């Protein structure tokens, strides 16, 4: 199989960077909205999302570098994405909980 040194690895890296950026931006928006609706728990949820977005960004960058080195070396062993998928899944669950909490808080008022 012929290795294309720029296209597929770069697209994957950019996709993870967009994911990390959207997590951080969503967390920052949550800092503005959630504490007023659900109290201190909203602040905690927003901070968890911001930190997780940073972790995803750093982990994605490191994984992209390792992947590019592995592809250039041609040894066929690429790093797995379990940590990235795990953190992203955690943030999705936290976001779902935040959405439910906002809906419940709005219904109570």
Image (cartoon, rainbow, N blue to C red):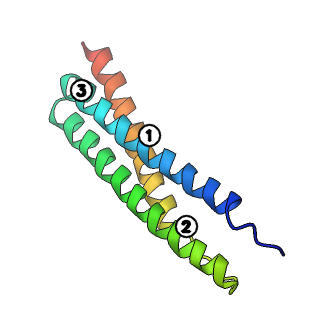
Identify the disc placed on residue 81: 2
Q: Which residue is mark 1?
A: 22
Q: Residues within 10 Å of mark 2 (few under 14, many from 20)?
A: few
Identify the disc placed on residue 36: none
Front position among marks 3 and 1: 1
Query: Taking 88 as reference, is 2 above or below it?
Result: below
Instruction: List the single residue furthest toward the right.
Output: 1
Query: Where's residue 56, x and y in %?
Result: 42, 57
Instruction: List the single residue furthest toward the left.
Output: 40
Q: Residues within 10 Å of mark 3 (few under 14, many from 20)?
A: few
The answer to whether any part of residue 76 appears in the image is yes
Q: From the viewer's side, name the closer residue of 70 and 22.
A: 70
Secondary-structure class at tag 1: helix
Task: Tell me the quadrant of the picture where the N terminus can be found.
Answer: bottom right
Earlier-in-chain disc, 1 versus 2: 1
Residue 22 appears left or right of 28: right
Residue at image position (58%, 73%) is 67
Instruction: List the single residue furthest toward the top.
Output: 109
Task: Tell me the quadrant of the picture where the C terminus can be found.
Answer: top left
Secondary-structure class at tag 3: helix
Query: Where's residue 23, x and y in %?
Result: 40, 43
Query: Where's residue 16, x and y in %?
Result: 52, 53
Q: Which residue is mark 3?
A: 32
Q: From the viewer's side, name the closer residue of 45 and 5.
A: 5
């Amino acid at each position: 199989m012929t290795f294309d040194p720029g296209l597929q690895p770069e697209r994957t890296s950019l996709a993870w960077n967009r994911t990390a950026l959207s997590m951080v931006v969503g967390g920052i928006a949550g800092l503005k909205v959630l504490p007023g609706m659900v109290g201190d728990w909203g602040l905690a949820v927003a901070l968890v999302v911001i930190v997780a977005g940073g972790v995803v960004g750093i982990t994605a960058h490191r994984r992209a570098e390792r992947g590019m080195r592995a592809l250039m070396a041609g040894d066929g062993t690429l790093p797995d994405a379990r940590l990235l998928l795990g953190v992203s899944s955690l943030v999705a669950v936290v976001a779902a909980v935040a959405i439910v909490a906002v809906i419940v808080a709005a219904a109570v008022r």
